Image (cartoon, rainbow, N blue to C red):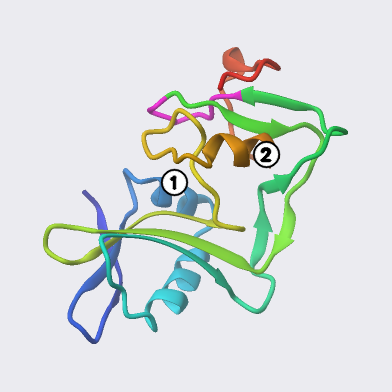
Amino acid sequence: MHRYTIAQSDSGYEIYVNLIASSAGLYLSRRPYVLSLIKEVLASMDLSGTYLEIEYDMGRTIGNTDILETSDKDVIYYAIPYKNKASVFSRYARNRYPLPSQMLSIIVKQDSAGNYEVINTWIGPCSPPFPGDENATDSSKTYWQTHALAQDFQGIQSKTITKACPY
């Protein structure tokens, strides 16, 4: 594992990210400046618990979010993104573009040594995983029926594109 330390807390635990094999690492490879935003948020927090979903308003525009609220007017399709090991379909809105956002979402999990690993992060509101994901929640299907991703520069597996909802 390529472990990159983001911060060290006063309580003695370390906050780190796996830059090679995690969803957070994939996101950060395309937006490396988000690493300093994560540090800004987590360095001042006293983390507790084994799994935390953090949605933080930075008070300024920090980038664009791919997560969009949708309506009946949107043309929706589903596809599996590249590098998606679980083969989970994402929901996309055609001809929609990312929007400016002040929100930073960070998913943190405590490891067996008591340190915290950033397992996922993105600019935008906190949202549940897509239905079919191993971490999907009861609210996943409901949420993703009214939200979609803007297909920014995310690659998708073109053979998986479908208009029929797979979940």
Answer left or right for 27 relative to 85: right
Going from N to C along the chain, the mark reached first, 1 or 2, is 1
Q: Write down the residue under mark 2.
A: 148
Magenta-drawn stretch, dominant element (helix, strand or loop)? loop
Q: In the displayed orientation, state which residue is furthest to the front.
A: 138
What residue is drawn where x is 51% and y is 61%? Answer: 105
Identify the mark at residue 26; answer none if there is no mark: 1
Task: Give neighbour class at mark 1: few <14, some 14-19, many 20+ (Cα, 10 Å).
Answer: some
* Magenta-colored stretch includes residue 161: no
* Viewer-side residue, 139 vs 19: 139
Answer left or right for 73 relative to 36: right
Q: In the displayed orientation, state which residue is furthest to the right.
A: 73
What residue is drawn where x is 45% and y is 61%? Answer: 106
- The magenta stretch spans which residues? 79-86
* Magenta-colored stretch includes residue 85: yes
Where residue 100 sits, quadrant-wise, is bottom right
> Where residue 136 sits in the image (x, y, percent)?
43, 38
Name the element at disc 1: helix
